[in-house]
Image (tube, grey):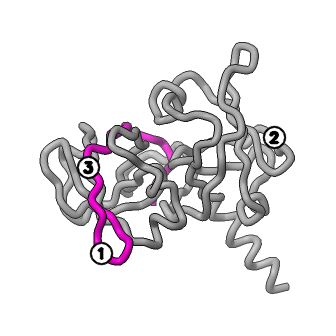
Amino acid sequence: MFTGLVQAIGEVVAIEPRAQGGARITLSSALIQSAAPGDSIAVNGCCLTVTEPNGPKASFDLLAETLKHTNMGDLKIGSVVNLEPSLRPTDRMGGHFVTGHVDTCGTIAFLGQDGADWRLDIHAPEIILNHIVRKGCVAIDGMSLTIADLIPGGFRIWIIPHTLAATNLKQRKTGDRVNLESDLLAKYTEKLLRKN
């Protein structure tokens, strides 16, 4: 379980293809310094298990399924990713409940200044839009963000300067794919309502 509050960014330093369409990625970040084998870390919002820690670097094994349904397959050497260690019982809950189980990918339709503020528009498939409401929560590449408005085929987010500076958003551009995880409560509500 995560909060969607990104605690650090990391850099992809190695990508190694593995059997049956999987891969092993190695990241470098100060956040990884104390990681142990088996630790869960959200990487761009995708819950991954540390398989081989090595000082400020750590490797993660990705299944073909993960590469197929997330943007992890888009990563290259030098790519910047958002990182968050798993939530401990004593941690403050500042974002919203994020499982690290990515629902689907969306596409950045616009990222840039709109007047004095920064705007992020995401085009998303219907599967995620069913759970998107104005002023609700969504995790984008692991960032807990508030939906400002619905737009045709997607939704709009306003970005504060801290989020822009402290995450991988500063490296993103129009057309990039982003991992999306809708609000857990919305998913359960939809399932319960479908039963009635």
Q: Is residue 21 magenta?
A: yes
- Residue closer to the observer: 154 or 12: 12
Closest to the camera, between mark 3 and mark 2, is 3
Disc 2 residue type? Answer: Asp
Instruction: Classify residue 59 by image quadrant.
Output: bottom left
Query: Circle 2 is placed at which residue position?
Result: 149
Q: Give the residues in magenta.
A: 1-23
Q: Residue at x 25, y 42 (%)?
A: 28
Q: Position of residue 58 (x, y in %)?
A: 22, 52
Label 3 secondary element? strand
Point out the image quarter for the N terminus. Answer: bottom left
- Residue that extends furthest to the bottom in the rendered view of this protein: 195
- Disc 2/disc 1 C-alpha distance (Å): 43 Å
Q: Is residue 98 left or right of residue 53?
A: right
Query: Circle 3 is placed at which residue position?
Result: 14
Point out the image quarter for the C terminus. Answer: bottom right
Dot 1 surroundings within 10 Å: few (below 14), some, or many (20 or more)? few
Dot 3 surroundings within 10 Å: few (below 14), some, or many (20 or more)? some
Q: Residue at x 74, y 71 (%)?
A: 189
Q: Residue at x 56, y 22 (%)?
A: 161
Q: Is residue 193 left or right of residue 62?
A: right
Disc 1 residue type? Answer: Ala
Tell me, for residue 19, which label it has, or none. Answer: 1
Q: Is residue 31 left or right of residue 163?
A: left
Does the residue at mark 3 contact the one at mark 2 (Cβ under 8 Å)? no
Tell me, for residue 141, which label it has, or none. Answer: none
Disc 3 residue type? Answer: Ala
Q: Position of residue 32 (x, y in %)?
A: 24, 46
